[in-house]
Amino acid sequence: MQKANKQGGNSNGKPRVKIGILNVLLILAGADLILLLSPEVGFLNGLFYIPGIYTWPALLLGVALLLFGFRHLYRPR
């Protein structure tokens, strides 16, 4: 019996994608800002009193970093 020739490339037909490392870091930084400094429920607000003048901009910056990071996270190869 002869062995079947293996087809080169991806066998399931889906194109391979490349994940941007900078985008992953932006997502992690945005998630950390949201978890640490979100008003009333953030981890640092549970330990210390942090005024709203610092927490609301940090929350908005965290959401912006998340959106910017997810924008071009996956790129075709």
Image (tube, rainbow, N blue to C red):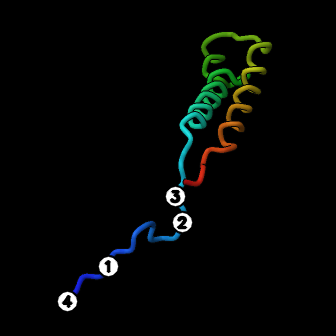
Mark 2, secondary structure of its residue: loop
Given residues 12 and 40, the one toward you in this image is: 12
Relative to 36, say whether 66 is above or below. below
Image point (65%, 37%), residue name: 69
| Extreme residue toward the left, this view | 1
The residue carrying mark 4 is 1
Mark 1, secondary structure of its residue: loop
Image point (62%, 22%), residue name: 36
The circle on residue 5 is 1
- Please state, as top left, top right, bottom left or bottom right, where the C terminus lies in the image: bottom right
Mark-to-mark CA distance, 1 and 4: 12 Å
The circle on residue 14 is 2
The amino acid type, in three-letter code, at marker 3 is: Arg
Marks 1 & 2, CB-CB < 8 Å contact: no
The amino acid type, in three-letter code, at marker 2 is: Lys
The circle on residue 47 is none
Tag 2 or tag 4, which sits nearer the N-term? 4
The residue carrying mark 3 is 16
Given residues 59 and 2, the one toward you in this image is: 2
Image point (22%, 86%), residue name: 2
Mark-to-mark CA distance, 4 and 2: 31 Å
The amino acid type, in three-letter code, at marker 4 is: Met
Mark-to-mark CA distance, 1 and 2: 20 Å
